[in-house]
Amino acid sequence: MYKKRIPLIANLTISMVLTAGLATFLTNTALAQDNAGLLETAIKAPHRSDANRARDQYRHPKETLLFWGLQPNMTVVEISPANGWYSEIIGPFLKKQGQFYAAVPTLTDNMPEAMKRRDASYRQMLKVAPEIYGNPVINTYDASAPVFAPNSAADLVVTFRNVHNWAKAGHTQSMFKGFFQALKPGGVLGVVEHRAKPGTPLTQQIESGYMTEQFVIESATAAGFRLDRSSEINSNPLDTKDHPGGVWNLLPNLRGVAENDKSKYRAMGESDRMTLRFTKP
């Protein structure tokens, strides 16, 4: 039986395409492994305190940041970094090739002294250790009309457990618009937030600190984002979400918890959390 023979040049072309595809796959795999290794180094670095390391089991920093696609040559903005738990990891990871922006709220005279002390401590942390953090940029923002970084400069914007604060202050939509403005087209917004049960009224969400995924997704999409995917990396099925003092009854605060109840709350761990990845079209 006659069999049509594929010309040699066609065979070579097919071979080259397959080889190129394999090379790309291997390169991407190697880069992913390198990123994971660099991130692991930052997470295990000696500048992190034992207290912060103890929370890795609840916050899953490696898995969370890789889920969002963090790479060492990115421009990354962390929103409201508080004491800098995540900055201690992201800053060193970006030190050689990337750029780290820390977006902190503008201080006002009526803010609690504890917030002012925390702000000063965070700034000092980044300033005194350039060998660890390189040259991070600290930008202050007004939540009613925030500017976090130069327009379309960021590859990745990340925020951890902050949405309930903006909802309480009425700044949710302005904040998400600010994220959108800071990101490049194709850029990623990563959100971790305490997760309420579906259907929880907004007033109860704000009071408890637990927000519904629906609220966060609708806030992001209203600003122009598309939900790319979600993850259960930071879920916690032990969290009953019915605590009298809201999420603050849990670790690390144990706020308002009676001494004889603290062991119960410690066993529960930190809150159940959504982990969402949005993209800017």
Image (cartoon, rainbow, N blue to C red):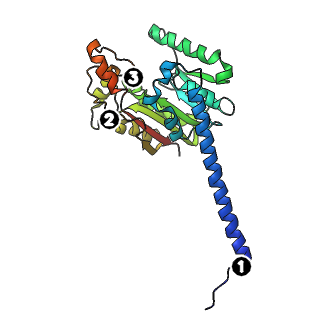
Task: Give coordinates of residue 185: x percent, y percent.
Answer: 58, 43
Q: Quadrant of the N terminus?
A: bottom right
Mark 3 against mark 2, which lies toward the viewer?
2
Q: Which residue is under mark 2? A: 237
259 vs 233: above or below: above
Of residues 49 and 104, the one nearer the viewer is 49
Q: Is residue 159 left or right of residue 130?
A: left
Of residues 66 and 119, the one nearer the viewer is 66
Q: Which residue is under mark 3? A: 169
| Mark found first going from the N terminus, 2 or 1 | 1
49 vs 172: above or below: above
Residue type at the position of mark 3: Ala
Task: Give coordinates of residue 46: x percent, y percent.
Answer: 59, 21
Residue type at the position of mark 1: Pro
Tell me the distance, in whole angstroms, between the alpha carbons under discs 3 and 2.
Answer: 29 Å
Rendered image: mark on residue 7:
1
Q: Residues within 10 Å of mark 2 (few under 14, many from 20)?
A: few
Q: Residue at x 50, y 37 (%)?
A: 63
Q: Residues within 10 Å of mark 1 (few under 14, many from 20)?
A: few
